[in-house]
Amino acid sequence: MKKAILLSCLSIVVSLNAQRILPEVERARIVDEILADRFDTLLPKLMDETDIDMWVVISREYNEDPVLRTMLPATWLNARRRTILLFYRNAENNTFEKLAVARYNVGDQIKSAWDKEKEPDQWKRLMQLIEVRNPKKIGLNFSEDFKIADGLDKTDYEAFMDRLPKKLHKNVVSAEPLAVRWIETRTEREMIIYSQLVDITHDIIAEAFSEKVITPGITTTSEVEWWMRQKVTDMGLNTWFHPTVDVQRSHDAVVGHGYSFSNRPDDTVILPGDLVHCDFGITYLRLNTDCQELAYVLKSGEEEAPEFLKEALKVGNTVQDFLTQNMKKGRTGNEILANSLQEAKAAGLRPSIYTHPLGLYGHSAGTTIGMWDSQGGVMAADGESYPLNENTVYAIELNTTITVNEWKRDIRIMLEEAGFYGAEGFRYVNGRQRELLLIPRIKSHQKN
């Protein structure tokens, strides 16, 4: 079975390389096959690990629980009416049930367990299914700490509790640990595909940061942003946030005296000698990328970037190393953040780290390692004590401040790349930037 799955994965990789972007019908097939694998192989394991034997996910059309959205088949763009999914795991008997208390089967994976003609009341039918199975713990999606795990609305929660037999009320628990593990955990097949997504992301950035798009002295940062946005649309993809492009330059230049997240620079004409930065990500096959890279605009007579900018990028790579070397299973995001910042500062660097989970959502659920405006650690509502788990993906996002004497100012080297943490430790999903992209002359950046 595992060999067949790997062969299927290899065929997908070949297809992605040949076509780059698959037609909708092929995307649907892959999405549904991945979902089937996640339901049948991953979910029972996660239920055992989190000690939740029944998981009930409830949503109404156009008000979908973020978790339920990740469980819908490719042909379901929304829930239908009120959609109730019930997953029951009996570890003792090694059985696993996937039921829909809905008028329809939810794709091929989840069969309807409600015949409205026999039992008109949907809630009553749900309670019948629960009572027969007599679960020890009934997980519902409510959470103070993770917004993605807090998708059960007040109306449906009250309706559920009003109808649940009183003897079972004590069995109701937050499904937070299970919901977060479902959202954050990547399968082997997803990771094979993820590499392709990151490669596509890098290619779009490389094209954007080239003479094809940028004419120094004419093209503005806003025009590059909209080019990237249009490129994504033309390729049949989506982006989960609007791209940003900005520049840093010499203190003596006409404009450009700093950069902050809360006050991003206005639209700026890109000039020779600029250090250009972008923040960009795509959504494809229900996975998301998030990438920040840097380019240098060559001045007349230059064939490469100045040495001081090359060295600045190396410092940024060093901060990445301090962070990723501290990513150890079981450590919380705050522990990883504190250790990484301490080590980087001890080396004389000025780092800022704000790495977030990445996967089925861009700013996903899981281990949060700092925020740009919270370098002392995140609060409980941001996942303060959540430990790092295997088979998870992160946007390795950070910056370091460097004094550039040649420019008479400080600059920030801002970097972001998708990274995977697994049983063998950390690796980048598809490399990281180690050389500046050059405009107008393109030079491929080294990956490791």
Image (cartoon, rainbow, N blue to C red):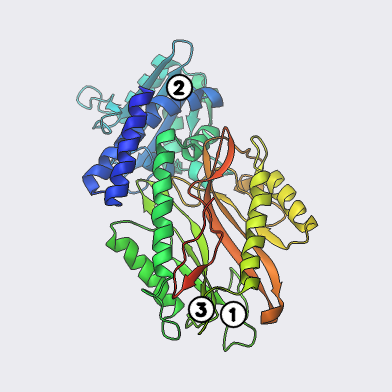
Secondary structure under tag 1 reads loop
| Residue topped by disc 2 | 165
Which sits in the foreground, 209 or 341? 209
Secondary structure under tag 2 reads loop
Vertical position of residue 310 compared to residue 188: above or below: below
Query: Which mark's residue is nearer the viewer, 2 or 1?
Result: 1
Query: Which mark's residue is nearer the viewer, 3 or 1?
Result: 3
Lateral position of residue 376 relative to residue 417, left or right: right
Vertical position of residue 188 compared to residue 113: above or below: below
Q: Please, which residue is most extreme toward the left here?
A: 117
Q: CA distance from mark 2 to mark 3?
A: 72 Å
Q: Amino acid at mark 2?
A: Pro
For the residues labelled 2 and 3, say whether their Cβ atoms are less than 8 Å apart: no
- Looking at the image, is mark 2 or mark 3 earlier in the sequence? 2
Residues packed near mark 2 inside 10 Å, few (<14), some (14 to 19) or many (20 plus): few
Q: Please, which residue is most extreme toward the top here?
A: 93
Q: Amino acid at mark 3?
A: Leu
Lateral position of residue 20 relative to residue 385, left or right: left
Which sits in the foreground, 320 or 73? 320
Q: CA distance from mark 3 to mark 1?
A: 12 Å
Which sits in the foreground, 158 or 332? 332
Q: Please, which residue is most extreme toward the right here?
A: 346
Lateral position of residue 421 relative to residue 131, left or right: right
Secondary structure under tag 3 reads loop
Vertical position of residue 391 compared to residue 285: above or below: above
The image quarter in which residue 422 lies: top right
x and y, in percent, of residue 277 in the image: 52, 69
| Residue topped by disc 1 | 249
Q: Which mark is residue 351?
A: none
x and y, in percent, of residue 411 in the image: 65, 72
Q: CA distance from mark 2 to mark 1?
A: 67 Å
| Residue topped by disc 3 | 298
